[in-house]
Every structure is written in C-alpha cells, then in structure tokens.
Image: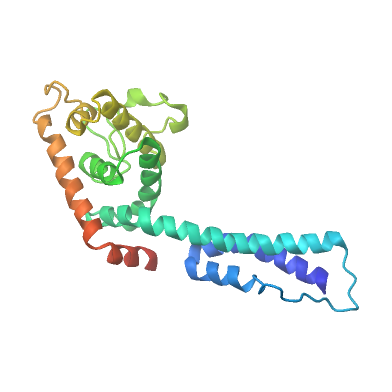
Amino acid sequence: MLERRIRRLAVVSVISTPVLLTIGLGPGRITSQSLTLPEHAPVRLHPSVVVSPAELDTLVQAIRKVRNAGEWTEEYVTVYREHVAPVEMALRRRGVDPVTSRKVAWPLVEHAAIQGLDPALVVSVVLVESSGKPTARSPVGARGLMQVMPFWAGHWSECGTDLYDIAGNLCYGTRILSEYLARFRGDERRALLGYNGCVRGTNTPNCHTYPDKVQSLRRQIQAEWDRRPVETIRLAVSE
C-alpha cells in the first residue's frame, strides 16, 4: 500500500519534468496545487499500516519533486513567453523555418543577456548577416548565424570551436559585438562597423550602410514587440 504509493510517486517525479516542460503552465500549476494540503489539514494513515521514518521521508521527497517540477515549469514557461517567444516570432516572420527559429531563439536570448546586449539588436545582426541560416558561409569564409570569421574559433573556450553550431556561433558573435561596443564606448554605429570589418570603410563595398540596415531592422522588430505582444505570446505558446 504505502510502499506501492511511494514507488508510484517516485515514477511520477521522474517522468513529470519532461512531460510538464512539454505541455506547459497549466498542468504545472495543477500539479503544485493538487499536492498542497490546506493549512492545519489532518493527515491520517490507515491504522493497520506501520510506516518507518525512512519511508515517510521517501514519500515527502517524492511529493516535493513533483511539486517543484510544477513550479519550475511555470518559471520555464514565463521565461519563454516573455523573452524567447518574441525572438522566435521575429525570426519566423522573416522567413526562418519554425524548427530553426526555436533552436536559435533560446541561445540567442541567453547569450545576449550574458553580454548585456539587447536581443532585438542581436536578432537583427543575425538576420542581416545570415538571414537566420546556421550553415551560412560568406565568400571570405565567415561562418554561421553571426558570420564569425574562422580565426575566432577557440578564442573563448566556453564557446567551443564549431562556428556552425548554433549556440557556439551566438556565443562568439555576441562576445565580439560586446567587445566592439566596449571599445567604442557604447557607440552602436561604430561598433557595428567594427563587427562588419568596416572600421576604415575599405574591406567591403558599401559596408558603411551596414549599421543602417541593422538598426532599421531592429526598430521594426522592437515596434512589433511593443505593438502586439499578446499575439506574439499566443502564437508561440500554442504550438
């Protein structure tokens, strides 16, 4: 009886996290609420059941795992809805397929946050540089989403060495952009020129227009986020 319940709860606690992460906020709240007893509620065991302290501790830990999974799921969905979904929708509206958009959005938001960058700026650079294609390669050898040059590979160990890897490329690209912003004391236009290899305006034809393209797209994306946040969230969570 109790032993069977303990085993059942242990199984539920193991499978609940991936299931809850898949189906989202509602079930997480239900799980948390259903396992919360009212204050001062009596707890009774059948008189014929002899329960050791160790068994009770196992039961309590199993319940806590399920409850915490529900609370963590709610936090997970909140982060997705408020920070990741808008990036995902911006990519999709500009022709990036849904699967790639989702793969790109999470690490983009994460690495933008690590470097203190506006996600709207980073997603704009991604779209201008590669149209959101992780396998993009330029004639001069720049690679991946943010068109990182090969000589950067291995420069930061935490970013790895594969510039076609989505998270790795975003790790490098956001770090490089952040360094240029620091070098030019927050002057975004000059930082973007530096990122594009256009500090002196001689490396790429018409490269002086690069900041205008990025900043124009950034304004469009930001306007979308400001204007229709409810729709963006609904579209993202429903899929």
List x then y, in percent, for residue 154: 42, 25
The image quarter containing residue 42 is bottom right
* Residue name at image x 29 percent, y 45 percent: 133
Do we see residue 99 in this rendering?
no
Does 109 appear above or below 92? Answer: above
Does 223 appear above or below 167? Answer: below
Task: Give left or right: position of 137 versus 8.
Answer: left
Labels in figure, total: 0
Do we see residue 95 in this rendering?
yes
Q: Residue furthest front?
A: 40
List x then y, in percent, for residue 178: 31, 31
Task: Give left or right: position of 49 versus 133.
Answer: right
* Residue name at image x 42 percent, y 55 percent: 79
The image quarter containing residue 204 is top left
* Residue name at image x 25 percent, y 56 percent: 225
List x then y, in percent, for residue 201: 11, 23
The image quarter containing residue 19 is bottom right
* Residue name at image x 33 percent, y 35 percent: 174
List x then y, in percent, for residue 88: 32, 54
Task: Give left or right: position of 222 versus 72.
Answer: left
Does 153 appear above or below 122? Answer: above
